[in-house]
């Protein structure tokens, strides 16, 4: 697939996440996706982990985001993926709200997305990846 087709898949992924469509989101991923979290330096690997992540994200995290306050700061398509920077406001169970800035880089594979690199505050990453947090592996740069 060429870069233009992969960018289209990336936008399908973003749209599917936006409407919490579990099957459509997973359909944009290659068989063994990898999600890398920064600056905490943790990695989630595999479709089973992605399925658990998205089930938790759609059921427990996304409903706590205020869609009316989301701000898109920019997006930058490239040869290996597309970077998207935005701010979301998260509503905690106690009622307080907090904005979080996120930089997500959706990475291209040969026929779909290979995963994502997510740059965000550790507090938000722990909320988003809660059910698999303790199973993630450290990223060793090299």
Image (cartoon, rainbow, N blue to C red):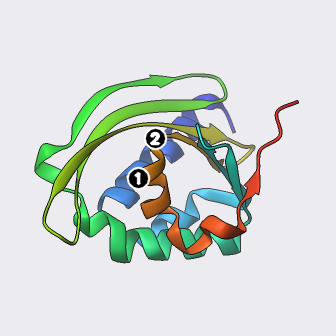
Task: Please identify the quadrant where the N terminus is shown.
Answer: top right
Q: Quadrant of the C terminus?
A: top right
Counting from the top left corner in percent of width and height, residue 106 is at 56, 40
Q: Residue at x 71, y 69 (%)?
A: 135
Q: Relative to the observer, which residue lies in front, 25 or 100?
A: 100
Q: What separation in Å lies between label 1 and label 2 (alpha carbons)? A: 7 Å
Q: In which quadrant of the rendered view does residue 81 lie?
A: top right
81 and 53: which is toward the camera: 53
- To which residue does mark 2 refer? 120
The percent position of residue 55, horizontal first and vertical second, equals 47, 76
Q: Which mark is residue 71?
A: none
Secondary structure under tag 1 reads helix
Taking the spot 76% from the left edge, 50% from the top edge, the residue there is 138
Q: Indicate the secondary structure of the residue bearing disc 2.
A: loop
Q: Is residue 41 above or below residue 58?
A: above
**What residue is drawn where x is 39% and y is 60%?**
16
Residue displayed at 27% across by 32% down: 72
Q: Are marks 1 and 2 in contact (CB under 8 Å)?
A: yes
The residue beneath circle 1 is 124
């Amino acid at each position: 697939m060429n870069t233009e087709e992969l960018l289209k898949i990336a936008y399908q992924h973003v749209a599917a996440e936006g409407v919490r469509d579990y099957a459509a989101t997973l359909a944009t991923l290659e068989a063994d996706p990898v999600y890398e979290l920064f600056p905490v330096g943790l990695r989630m690997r595999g479709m089973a982990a992605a399925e658990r992540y998205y089930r938790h994200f759609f059921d427990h995290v996304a409903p706590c985001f205020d869609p009316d306050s989301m701000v898109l700061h920019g997006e930058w398509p490239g040869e290996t993926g597309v970077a998207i920077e935005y701010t979301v406001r998260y509503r905690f169970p106690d009622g307080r709200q907090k904005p979080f800035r996120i930089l997500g880089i959706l990475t291209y594979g040969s026929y779909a997305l290979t995963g994502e690199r997510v740059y965000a505050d550790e507090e938000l990453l722990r909320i988003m990846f809660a059910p698999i947090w303790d199973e993630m592996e450290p990223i060793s740069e090299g």
